[in-house]
Image: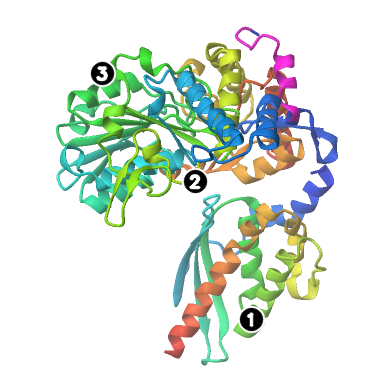
Amino acid sequence: MSATELDALYQEIILDHYKNPHNKGLREPHEAEVHHVNPTCGDEVTLRVHLTGEPGAETVADVSYDSVGCSISQASASVLTDLVIGKPVDEALAIHESFLTLMQGRGNVEPDEDVLEDGIAFAGVAKFPARVKCALLSWMAWKDATARVIQEKAS
Amino acid sequence: MEGLLPQLEVVRKDFPILERTLAGGMPLVYLDSANTSQKPQCVIDTMVDHLERHNANVARAMHQLGAEASEAFETGRDRVAAFIGAPSRDEVIFTKNASEALNLVANTFAWARGDLAVGEGDEVVITEMEHHSNIVPWQLLTQRTGATLRWFGLTDDGHLDLEGIDDLITERTKIVSLTWVSNMLGTVNPIAAITRKAHEVGAVVVVDASQAAPQLPIDLAAMDEAERPDVIAFTGHKVVGPTGIGVLWGRRTLMEQLPPFLGGGEMIETVTMERSTYAGLPHRFEAGTPPIVEAVGLGAAVEYLSDLGMEAVHAHEQAITAYALEGLATVPGLTVLGPLDATQRGGAISFEVDGVHPHDIAQVLDSRGVAVRAGHHCAKPAHARYGVQSSTRMSSYLYTTPSEIDALVEALEYTRSYFKLG
């Protein structure tokens, strides 16, 4: 890997989020809390979701988290919360889908800045298969927690 | 530098991979040998020659190729037996890897009856510095049998805490299983003293030699019987051999008492529809077609190490490790986990750098051609003991040069500047 590729991985935006993560720390209220780990490297995240609104038309009122891990996993949790807090769940899930597509695209997917905002900085990560899981850790945790809340409300 | 292998540059030429370059034209600095070692040309050639000229199944083919393959396979066993000074070559059992060797022992104990039976009231003792491969099989054994799992804790400076040994190894202890050399802390454990203590209470001693076999001279036959472990396990790919083959050496009188592990071809004496009788050692524990070319390659690998001389390999590791500890100490914010005295440790050195996560360190090092491991190194409890989530690990071997250590230290400095740390 060349220095240029390294810079493509560690975009300034990622390093900024790593040093100053947004929305970090566990908060109340929440309807679901999940704990996800990356077994190969040991990175961990505990993530809470608070949804408001009527069933079928919920809004992501808050996402709070506590985590240990590398710059990629920490920065991606920070970016996730910026992107989904305050959004209708449907829209947030669409953003999730868009981020997942970017991460699984092996570097061949052109990210949409209107949808992913700071998340486009992770485009370089998709070229490093070993790091894709780092970037997705908190995103998968958020989807899991959100699904649990919705399921619970429906039952 | 004193202690380095004589003609190190010539030795390095035996390992073709060391000459390759990585992206950006960076020369490879391979410091991940505790993960897997590189292979000398003689091992590669021996395996290719076997596949090209002698390939057949072993011990059951009544033709010339079968005889040649069987002889090559069993010669592999002879060479491994000589490498560890096994009292008998029939005590050398080939497995898939060290994990399978340890699982073989734990499983057969779970099924044992009579003197070797493990049950409620019995205890199995391990240590907090084990690789997961030497923790999980014993958790399974004790959970399945109702026995109790206990363990040695660790001191702040990375050694086994032996203070409570009299409370830990008692008349209730059936098995003591521990690593010879820690894959994370590098610590070399006092195997002889612990084995003596365990034997005094009639316990069986199992030693994970995965990190010891590559770097310490082992001569089982020369050990005092009271201090000789009953079982040692190691893997082929860390001793410059191929993957897919591990070694289980077990004292004959123990292994003959343990029930079979896997049933199948080659492990039987005779089979009827009602029941079977079993082959003698080592075939009793080698069901099915074994890893043949891997055994042949492993034989060539341990012969290569013996030709270099394990005393010389050990001296080289100690010299490089001392040099690495000195170099790492110059990196601001870097903390080594484990003993700081090279004479008390093996060649794997795990460390933390303030302000940079191990993955990020490994990634930046990789961009400079320096290959290390980052994560928990399959030793989560040992990391937890020191309040560390993960670490970066450099591990040298017989082909490592002082200038490669310099490259590591320089790349660590670069990493700190990359992440804007002072």
Question: x, y (%) of residue A114?
Answer: 79, 75
Element at label 2: loop
| Mark 1–mark 2 CB contact (< 8 Å) | no
Mark 2 against mark 3, which lies toward the viewer?
A: 3
Q: CA distance from mark 2 to mark 3?
A: 39 Å
Q: Chain of mark 2?
A: B
- Disc on the earlier residue, 2 or 3: 3
Judge whether B94 appears above or below B137 on screen. above
Question: x, y (%) of residue B41?
Answer: 71, 26
Q: CA distance from mark 1 to mark 2?
A: 33 Å
The amino acid pointed to by label 3 is Ala
* Residue picked out by circle 1: A87
- The colour style of the image is rainbow
Residue at 45% x, 87% y is: A153
* Residue picked out by circle 3: B226
Residue at 66% x, 82% y is: A91
**Residue B389, label in figure:** 2
Q: Is B233 positioned to the left or the right of A9 in the image? A: left
The magenta-colored residue range is: B2-16
